[in-house]
Each structure stands twice: as C-alpha cells, then as structure tokens.
Amino acid sequence: MEPVVTVGLDGSPESLAAARWAADEAERRKLTLRLLHAWPLLVPEPAHVPAEMDQNYGRWRNLHPAGAEHQTRHPPRPVPGPRHAHHAQHALLRAAAESEMTVLGSRGLVPVESYFLGDISMPIVARADGPVVLVRAGTGGRGPHPAPAPAAEGGVVVALKLHGSCDHLLEFAFTTAAARGVPLRAVNGQSLPVAAYTPWGVDHDVAEEIALDARKQLDQILRPWRDRFPHVEVDDGIVLESPAKAVVGAAQGAGLLVVGRRKHHPAPASHLGSVAQAAIHHARCPVAVVPHT
C-alpha cells in the first residue's frame, strides 16, 4: 500500500486546521494525503438516488472544503477521499494502522482555560498503532470559527526518557526535523530527589551530579541518531524539574512537540503517561504522540 498521511475530518474548524497541517506534512514527506470522515449512518445508505435525496449527504459534503483547498495548494499530489459509514473510532483506528501518521483536530478554549479534546481524539491517541498528531485551530477567540493555526515555525522538540527503548520516537522526530529543515531539541526532565534539598534551598553539588549523569545518558541515546541524520542540528537539554513541566516549557515556540506512549498500556486515555497528558493539554503547538515498546 502507498504510504499515506490520514487526517480525520468532522467539518469543524479544528479538523480543517488539521487537514492543512497534514497536507503540508504530506507534501514535505512526499506522501499521499488521505481525508477520512467516519460516522454512524443516519439512515441505511440508499442505492441509485440523487445526492440531494440522501439524508447522509450533508455529512459527505464536509470533506469537500478540505479536499478542494488541498488540491489548490498542492496540485501535484492526489487526494483520495474515502468515506466510511462506521463508528468513527473503529474507522480511524483501522486507518491509523495503515498510515505513516494520523492527524486529528483539537478543540481550543481561551488560553488560560487550557483545552479539551473531543470524544474521538483521546481514544485514538491511546490505541493507535502509529503516530497521532493533534493540531489546534488557534486561540484567536471564543467564537465557533477559531483562527486557523499558523504555518509551522520553530524546531521540533522531542521528550525523552533515559531508560527503555525510544527508537520509534527518535526516528519520527529526526525524520520530521530533516523534512522541515529545522533544528531538533531533545529534552529530558529530572525531578530532584528529597536528598537534593536543604533548609536553605537546593544542594547545587547534588543537582550538578544528577544533571551530569543524565546528560551523559542522553548523549549516548542521541549519538547514533546524530550520525544517521548528520544534517539535522541537534540540541539536548536536561531540565531539573518534573518531566511534564520541562517538556511543556521546552515546547514554547516549537513547530512540533513529539512525545511517547507505551504500546502495552490499556486503551483508556487515563493510562497515557503524565508527560503525554501534559503535552496534549498544555502545549500550544501541534503534538505528535508516538507509540513505542
């Protein structure tokens, strides 16, 4: 099967912003963009009737704005437009298993209120076999038509643990940075142990020892990837605070934040790790959640 980037559409401004982001990413990677809209049928699908008499037709039309816009902006690339009359989660999970990445929209509230995701996005993030990218429509206002997300700017930030496999995570992050021609920043957060605190503050010797040891481990993890992607500028950082805070802080001004999710976790979204949860709910840039073992 031809490699594709799948974007889930529901006709909302958020999903249209996701379609724009996915179209640009598909163009960078020379992949085909697939627009997917799935829902339960309002009535059994009729055969051999005009479109205007089909009660489901209004939902089919939600594909048209994104498809037309992509064909205008990226005419050389074909845009398949599958329409699935299935439960949305089932259709998206099946499509995600066949895609290089799946892109979904996130609903935005005003900045101080963070934001929430719809009933579909979080189960897909928690269960998809491949990377899922969540794209916000913008924070320009409370109205029903949020401002479009700005064009991707800034580098790629990847959140790394120092133990366990992270090859899938790093492959996605380095490939994305290389395709965009932007720097990659690898971040690891280290919460200081109780022993590092004294009555007058943090024991700097203990903190420096922890940071030095973590930096050595991070350098070992990154070394083979630096060799594999010599043209990608790589910066690494150890931040002595909780991993979640460190990652969200590092993502300010980034074009994409990449975080991991362990594949063996159960399906409910509550089993996403604390870093992935924080990234999804607080990072202002698009967030890619990459499953790994």
Image (tube, rainbow, N blue to C red):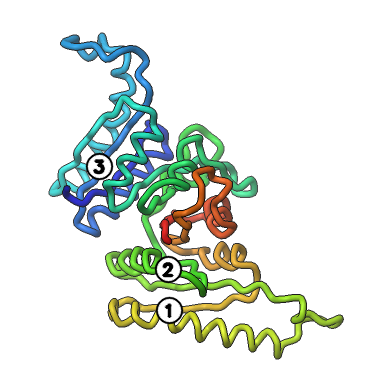
Residue linked to disc 1: 221
Residue 104: quarter of image: top left
Q: How far is mark 2 from mark 3, CA to CA?
A: 28 Å
Tell which circle, 2 or 1, labels the residue nearer the N-terminal end. 2
Element on which disc 1 rests: helix
Tell which circle, 2 or 3, labels the residue nearer the N-terminal end. 3
Element on which disc 2 rests: loop
Q: Nearer the viewer, mark 2 or mark 3?
A: 2
Q: How far is mark 3 from mark 1, CA to CA?
A: 34 Å
Say whether marks 2 and 1 touch (CB < 8 Å): yes
Give the residue displayed 40% in from the left and 51% down from the top. Answer: 133
Residue linked to disc 3: 34
Residue linked to disc 2: 166
Q: Disc 1 residue type?
A: Ile
Q: Position of residue 231 (x, y in %)?
A: 28, 78
Q: Position of residue 179 (x, y in %)?
A: 27, 65
